Every structure is written in structure tokens, then in C-alpha cells.
Image (cartoon, rainbow, N blue to C red):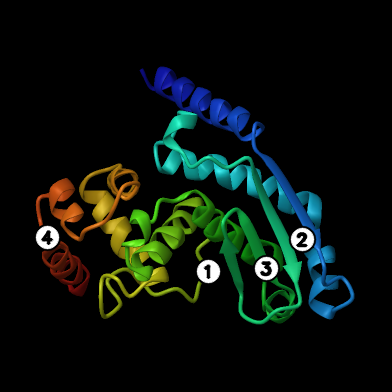
């Protein structure tokens, strides 16, 4: 039985990887003349970045349970541009923009950190946003949830149970969503699917049977002890 489950899981990953080939992935570095741009070329590189975009997309589809092309956004290409800009990174439509200044200031494993950032930003390419009605904290939290599940959460993130609000965003919301998913595996996939046509906080109650404020209280209580 275990062998059959492993075989099915392997088949799903292979199928998703094949589907990723139907989407094109490209990367360019417009900041090669800066110290951060040179560091990107040395520590990460364009070929590796394109592979990460492909791998991340397949992982996101699996996380969102979007095995069929019709379940996903219609995206033909995902691009990455390294630029001499401030901040960390941002995504507009299907284009990811990474700050060379940020890359230049990373302490520790540059390749792993950039990989994590790309998983986060690639999630923005593929996730639904409730037709613009979902709050930004949840959107960013889902992106960091994907980064967390992919194994690229940095050490400076908050620990489970920390944070002031469920929709505080980023790592705080990612940890909370991980808790919600532990209550009902596939919760985040179901939440994202519902966000295709709109958004309301009631989605939490419809999927998990408790409103989001009660879930947050339960989450905080679990990790206090």
C-alpha cells in the first residue's frame, strides 16, 4: 500500500513538472553592473533561477491542488528581472522583479534566500486574490505559506503562535495558515479555490466550522502551553 501511495505521488509530481514545461520561464539581470547584480550572477545565476520558477510553479499547483490546467490562472510565461531597485521583490501580473540591492545585502546563504523569495513571488503569479477583495495580509500570508511548505523559511521568521493578528501577513499569517491546514489537510488549497470568484472571512467557517477569530484564539492558546 505504501508503495502504491508513493508511486501515485511520484506520478503527480512528474505530471505537474510536465505541465510546467507548457509554461515558459525566463530570467534576466538588468543590474549586472552593480555589486548586488554581480553577486546574483555568482551565487544564483539565470539558469538556476529559471529552474526555480519552473519547480516553484509545479509545487504551487500541487499545494493548491490545481492538477488540471483549467483550475489555474491562464499564464503562458513567468519572468524574472533582477533590477537595481529598493525593497526585496514585487510581482506584477506574471512578472517578478527582484532587487539587486537586497541580494547584495543578504547575510548567509544567498542562493537559499533568493530561492525562498522566488517561491513567494511565484505564488503571487498563480494564486487567486478574491477578485481584489481579499486583504493584503492574507495574500502575503499564503505566499509565505507556500515558501514555508517548500522548506525555504528563513530563521528570522516568527515562531508558531507568535503575532498580533491572523491577517498580519507574511510569516505570521503563514504560520496561522499552517495551523489551519493541520486541522483539515488541503485547507489552503480550498481557501485559494474559493478566492477565485471573491472573498469573505466566512470562508474559514465554511471550510473549518469556526470563524477566523475563534481559530486565531485557538491557535494562540495551543502555542501558549
Q: CA gap, disc 4 to disc 3?
A: 36 Å
Q: Which residue is mark 2?
A: 44
Mark 1 residue crowding within 10 angstroms, few (<14) / some (14–19) / many (20+) = some
In the drawing, what numbered circle is on residue 180? none
Residue where numbered disc 3 is placed: 98
Per the image, the residue denoted by label 4 is 211
Report, in whole angstroms, how far the alpha carbon at label 4 lies from the one at label 1: 30 Å
Q: Secondary structure at mark 1?
A: loop
The quadrant holding residue 164 is bottom left
Residue 154 is tagged as 1
What x and y, as percent, mark residue 55? 61, 43
Name which of mark 1 and mark 3 comes first in the sequence.
3
SS for dot 2: loop
Asked whether, in this view, residue 172 is left or right of residue 27, the answer is: left
Quadrant of the drawing holding the C terminus: bottom left
Note whether 109 is above or below 149 in the view shown: below
Q: Secondary structure at mark 3?
A: strand
Q: Residue at x 58, y 62 (%)?
A: 92
- The answer to which image quadrant residue 132 occupies is bottom left
- Between the residue at mark 2 and the residue at mark 3, the CA separation in whole angstroms equals 12 Å
Picture quadrant where residue 46 is located: bottom right
Task: Return the residue nearer the eye: 62 or 200.
Answer: 200
Task: Give me the residue at 61% from left, 70% from top.
Answer: 89
Q: Earlier in the sequence, mark 2 or mark 4?
A: 2
- x, y percent for residue 97: 66, 66
Badge 2: residue crowd in 10 Å (few <14, some 14–19, many ≥20): some
Q: Is residue 45 left or right of residue 166?
A: right
Disc 4: CA contacts within 10 A as few (<14), some (14-19) or many (>=20): some
Q: What is the CA distance from the residue labelled 2 to the residue labelled 4?
A: 43 Å
Image marks 4 and 3: residues in contact by CB distance under 8 Å: no
**Label 2 or label 3, whichever comes before in sequence order:** 2
Amino acid at each position: 500500500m505504501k508503495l502504491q501511495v508513493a508511486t501515485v505521488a511520484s506520478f503527480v509530481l512528474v505530471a505537474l513538472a510536465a505541465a510546467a514545461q507548457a509554461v515558459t520561464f525566463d530570467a534576466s539581470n538588468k543590474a549586472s553592473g552593480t555589486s548586488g547584480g554581480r553577486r546574483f550572477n555568482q551565487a544564483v545565476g539565470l539558469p538556476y533561477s529559471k529552474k526555480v520558477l519552473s519547480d516553484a510553479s509545479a509545487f504551487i499547483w500541487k499545494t493548491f491542488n490545481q492538477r488540471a490546467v483549467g483550475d489555474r490562472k491562464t499564464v503562458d510565461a513567468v519572468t524574472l528581472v533582477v533590477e537595481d531597485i529598493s525593497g526585496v521583490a514585487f510581482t506584477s501580473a506574471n512578472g517578478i522583479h527582484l532587487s539587486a540591492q537586497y541580494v547584495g545585502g543578504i547575510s548567509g546563504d544567498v542562493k537559499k534566500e533568493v530561492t525562498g523569495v522566488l517561491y513567494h513571488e511565484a505564488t503571487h503569479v498563480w494564486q487567486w486574490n478574491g477578485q481584489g477583495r481579499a486583504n493584503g495580509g492574507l495574500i502575503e500570508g499564503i505566499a509565505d505559506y507556500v515558501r514555508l511548505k517548500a522548506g525555504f523559511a528563513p530563521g528570522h521568521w516568527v515562531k508558531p503562535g507568535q503575532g498580533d493578528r491572523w491577517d498580519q501577513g507574511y510569516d505570521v499569517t503563514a504560520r496561522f495558515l499552517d495551523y489551519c491546514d493541520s486541522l483539515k489537510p488541503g485547507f489552503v488549497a480550498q481557501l485559494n479555490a474559493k478566492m477565485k470568484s471573491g472573498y469573505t472571512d466566512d470562508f474559514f467557517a465554511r471550510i473549518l466550522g469556526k470563524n477566523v477569530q475563534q481559530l486565531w484564539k485557538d491557535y494562540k492558546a495551543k502555542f501558549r502551553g
